[in-house]
Image (tube, rainbow, N blue to C red):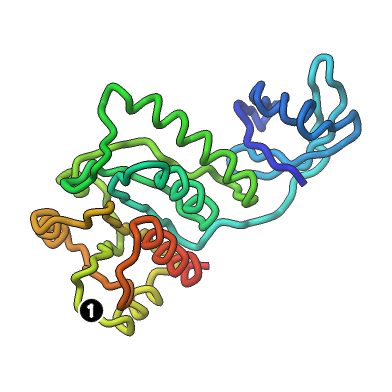
Amino acid sequence: MQRYFAQNFNLKENVITLSSDDIFHISKVMRMRVGDTFECVADGKIFLCEITSFTPFLFKIAAELKENHEICGFIRLLYCVPKGEKLDLVIQKATELGVNEIVLINSERSVAKIEKDKKEKKLERFNKIIKEASEQSKRSSLMKLTDVISFSEISKYKADINLLAYEKSDQNLDEVEQILHSAKGKTVNVIVGAEGGISPKEVEICNANNYKIISLGKRILRSETACFYILSLLSFYMD
C-alpha cells in the first residue's frame, strides 16, 4: 500500500494535511478513487486513511497501524561529497537501510563541493529523494539531511561509537565485528571518504575526536560501495 508523509498535522484534532505533490500522485499517478485507502505518517505514527472526496481532496483516518521499521539505535553517516550522481544514490540507499541522519562534508579530497550559495537548493532536492525513499521502504520517520560542513566540524556531532572507514587501516574484520556487535541501541557516527579517500590531516582530526579507524576488508571499494557496505552491516547488527 502506498505510504505518504504528512505535510502538516494536529493529531489532537485528527487533522492531517498532505502536500499538493502527494495529492497529485494519489489522484493522477496512482489513480485512486473515493473509498480507496493509503498509509500516512504523522509525528512517527502510521495511519490507514480512506479517501472521502477529491473536490476538494479529503480523507478520514480509518485506523492507526502498529508497525516499526526503524532500527534499534541511531546511525549518522558523515559522507565526504563525491562527484557526479553518486550522492543521490547514496542518499536514497542510506534511507532504505535505516540511516537516521546524513551530514555532508566538503573534505580536502572531495572533487565536487557544495558551496554555500547552492546549499539550500541542493538540500531541497536531497530531501525530496529522502521522502520518496522513506515512503518506498515503509519507514515511519524521515531521515535528516540538514547540513554541509568542513571536516574540522565533525566534533559537533556526538555519538557513542565513532567509526572512520579507512583503506589504510590494519584493523582486522574480527575487531570490526566486535564493534558492530556493541552498536545496537546506540548512536553511531560513520565517516566515509570521497573518491580520493581521507587525507592524513583528516585522519588526525578523527583521532583527536575518538574515531575508531576500521577496515572494510581486503579490497578497495568505491566511495558509494563503501557506504552501502558499512551501512548494511550496521543495519543488520542494530536491527
Quarter residue 44 falls in? top right
Check the image and name the residue furthest to the top: 55
44 lies above or below 13:
below
At horizontal 34% and vertical 57% (from top left) the residue drawn is 223
Percent across and percent down for residue 199 are: 13, 56
Q: Which of 126 and 67 is in front in this view?
A: 126
Q: Which of 158 and 86 is in front in this view?
A: 86
214 lies above or below 138:
below
Quarter residue 12 falls in? top right
221 lies above or below 1:
below
Q: Would residue 10 be seen by someone viewing this image from the given angle?
A: yes
Q: Which amino acid does label 1 sit on?
A: Gln
Check the image and name the residue furthest to the front: 84
Percent across and percent down for residue 119 are: 33, 28
**Left or right for 107, reference 74:** left
Q: Would residue 13 be seen by someone viewing this image from the given angle?
A: no
At horizontal 45% and vertical 43% (from top left) the residue drawn is 88
Q: Nearer the viewer, residue 217 or 127?
A: 217
**Left or right for 78, reference 52:** left
**Left or right for 178, reference 236:** left
Q: Which residue in the structure is indicated by mark 1?
A: 171
Percent across and percent down for residue 121 are: 40, 25
Circle 1 packing at 10 Å, graded few (<14), some (14-19), many (20+), is some
At horizontal 28% and vertical 64% (from top left) the residue drawn is 165
Q: How many marks?
A: 1
At horizontal 23% and vertical 41% (from top left) the residue drawn is 106
Percent across and percent down for residue 217 are: 32, 76
